[in-house]
Image (cartoon, grey):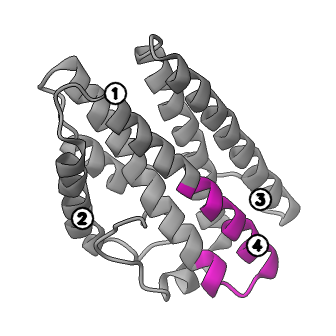
Amino acid sequence: MLGLKLLTDPRWANIAASNLDEILTDHAWCEQKAASNAITLITQNPEHEDLVHELTAIAIEEMQHFQMVIDIIKARGYTLGRERKDDYVGQLMRFSKKDGSRNQAFIDRLLFAAMIEARSCERFRVLSKNIDDQELAKFYHDLMVSEANHYTTFLHFARKYTTDVDVDKRWQEWLDFEGELIQSYGKKEYIHG
């Protein structure tokens, strides 16, 4: 369903499990950034009422996930660390087209969001299937379902609102780029690391 070119090695879950305070802090900030991205899309495209409605719900849900992760951090006696730089997301952002029409930039921002949600969904699946901590396994399973819904929402809007982009062709370019990019990741206790 996700179309990702390279799946995460299940052994990455061992790295995450051995550094739970780090993965949880990174995860919390990923949720906050996802909410911010949804808000940015709303701010830049208020004329699309259905998009505003759907992305408002996503922004709220992402902040609820942020709160849920913070609650887990606190319950386990950890402290929320500072925001981490996400090199993976930075490289995806650099791949985004910014020099075309307003619509092209809008569609690429939607595809950028879909790509992050797809990889997050896949990583949450790996955690849910391969981590021994049953509480976290269930938590990540539930979030996997949510991320899959977000992924399809962003792709839906890209297809709906394109005026000058072959969305399927551009999405394939995103998948190809991400497939090469992700080969350098999966070795750190970060959601996209």
What residue is disc 4 on?
A: 138
- Indicate the amino acid at tag 1: Tyr
Q: Is residue 163 left or right of residue 52?
A: left
Residue 157 on the magenta segment: no
Name the N-terminal-most of marks 4 and 3: 3
User: Eyeballing the image, is 189 above or below 14?
Assistant: above
**Which residue range is magenta in the image?**
127-148
| Most common SS among magenta residues | helix
Q: Quadrant of the C terminus?
A: bottom left
Of the residues tagged 4 and 3, which is closer to the observer?
4
User: Eyeballing the image, is 67 above or below 128?
Assistant: above
Residue at 78% in and 51% down = 68
What residue is disc 3 on?
A: 73
The secondary element bearing badge 3 is classed as: helix
Residue at 36% in and 50% down = 89
Q: Is residue 112 left or right of residue 165?
A: right
The secondary element bearing badge 1 is classed as: helix
Please state which of residues 13 and 46 is positioned toward the viewer in this rendering: 46
Question: Is the residue under label 2 in contact with that under label 1 (CB below 8 Å)?
Answer: no
Residue 181: image tag: 2
Name the N-terminal-most of marks 1 and 4: 4
- In the picture as drawn, the residue positioned furthest to the left comes out as 99
Residue at 49% in and 89% down = 11
Of the residues tagged 1 and 4, which is closer to the observer?
1
In the rendered image, residue 127, in percent from the top left (x then y), is placed at 60, 76
User: Eyeballing the image, is 39 above or below 69?
Assistant: above
Is residue 72 something that shows in the picture?
yes
Name the N-terminal-most of marks 3 and 2: 3
Question: Is the residue under label 2 in contact with that under label 4 (CB below 8 Å)?
Answer: no
Q: Quadrant of the N terminus?
A: bottom left
Please state which of residues 92 and 77 is positioned toward the viewer in this rendering: 92
